[in-house]
Image (cartoon, rainbow, N blue to C red):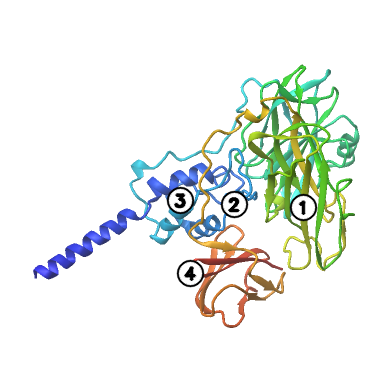
Amino acid sequence: MKLISKGILFLTLWHSAATAQTPTWAEDVAPILYQNCTSCHIDGGIGKFSLVGYNQAKNWASGIKYQTQNRTMPPWPADPKYKRYAHERILSTEEIKTLADWVDGNTPQGDLSKAPVDPVAQTGILTPNPDKLLKMENYVATTNTDEYRCFVIPAGISSNQYLTSIEVIPGNRKAVHHVLVFYDTSKIPLQKDIADPKPGYIGFGGTGSSTSTLVGLWVPGAEPYAFPAGMGIQLLKNGYFILQIHYPGGLNSELDSTKVAMKLSSGPLRQVFISPPINHDGALQNGPLYIAPGTTKSFNAKYTLPLNVTAFAVGPHMHLIGRSIKAWAVNTNGDTTPLISIPKWDFHWQRQYSFRNPIKLTVGSTIWGQASYDNTTANPFNPNNPPLGVSVGEKTTDEMLLIYFWYTAYQAGDENIVIDGSTPKNIGTVLLEPNHEMAKAWPNPTEDLVHLETTGFKPGLVNVKIYAATGQCLAELTETNIQERISLQVSHYPSGLYHIQVQQGRQLQTVRVYKQ
């Protein structure tokens, strides 16, 4: 009896210890989700579902684990192992493991009295006493596909001014995916607006005017952007702001009335410029930018600096068949400075990346850019099926290669300006080791059956999961033998993008499949 009692006591203590080690939603998971995810995944937000509250998080537990271990959520396409940035929206290794342990531990709720206060959707203006508050014409978005629409707003500036701070306030966070803000003194955007019977006009790659200058942007979770003291973007008098707004598919009669709040100064200030020295017009080394149907191709570009500059931020831009893009600088001594690397380009998640401290780039340094494109049926974002030849242009089916920089003429001490002084999160090896390049699927797109080819796994058993684009796990096949190819039936799923995950031990491979 004593032995039995000791055995029961041991099991009880072991169970208690195991339970204590399992993260709970209230104390461990909610703080992570509320800090990193609910700017989108909240009622009224652009996310397709809410992660506010225990029940919502539990419902999406498998998707949370999958998307965070793959580092596809929170969306931060830049590779943090190549370059760290200010105000990164990424999870640390420890946070990813906490979420996975919570899911694997059957999602315990924990003590709700210790949970953080539920967030609410952000409304209102954060900029105190803005000098200008401009609102676009009301627009009702109804679309089954991605819509990029430009709205023209007279600036109301009768003399040259400097833009020192800008904030975009989406009029409908459920409908607005992201916003690019341009400034233009020509009449071209206004003429395009007049020619379109609806408010604004369709504009995919830009405004349709070569004289438009990018001055700001907004993505979910963004806060007002202010330039360092004594600096600003010059706005010439009698110009127009153009808001290029991305409305995602699946919207029905959603009213939007997005605003822009800004701080202005008559100056004179140190002028900040936003321009793409790496571009498809004059910087390409192996141009012109053309990708033949059914092919993949990479392009190299370079630009030699004529003066010392201070770079604050970088923002690459391509269209739908873009696959990856990278930029770095090499000074006259041969020293290399990494600037940006996006190994998995996604047009829907483009943004500006601010450096933690401004970077000094010296005269004579060469900025290099490298971009690759996939114009085959294996690219689920290819707008043409079968593929067609793609060259430079503004249309959805065209392409671009642009790497924008936010910069000013260098002054001593610029590199000591602190844009983000926080300690960067640890991004060491996560619980699983994703390798997105090793799994292949065909045919892709498909209507019914898809075949998977994996490499790097040992012959034996693997687990296969099918996820919707939202992260919801739709099916799980355990102990599948990979000595032969894996064939999956997907005819019963709606048309759209799916992620298929293959796991063996700590090895993880993922492939994107488009169901027609």
Tell me the element at label 4. Answer: loop
Task: Residue type at mark 1: give it.
Answer: Gln
Q: Nearer the viewer, residue 134 or 130?
A: 130
- The residue at which mark 3 appears reads as 94
Identify the mark nearer the N-term, 1 or 4: 1
- Tell which tag, 3 or 2, sits nearer the viewer: 3
Q: Is residue 44 above or below residue 467?
A: above
Real-space Cα separation, disc 3 to disc 2, in angstroms: 26 Å
Real-space Cα separation, disc 2 to disc 4, in angstroms: 31 Å
- The residue at which mark 4 appears reads as 505
- Tell which tag, 1 or 4, sits nearer the viewer: 1
Q: Is residue 265 above or below residue 433?
A: above
Instruction: Give the residue displayed 79% in from the left and 20% down from the top.
Output: 161
> What is the quadrant of the N terminus in the image?
bottom left
Can you tell which mark lies on residue 370?
A: 1
For label 3, count other residues whose C-alpha is less than 10 Å away and answer few (under 14), some (14-19) or many (20+): some
Real-space Cα separation, disc 1 to disc 4, in angstroms: 34 Å
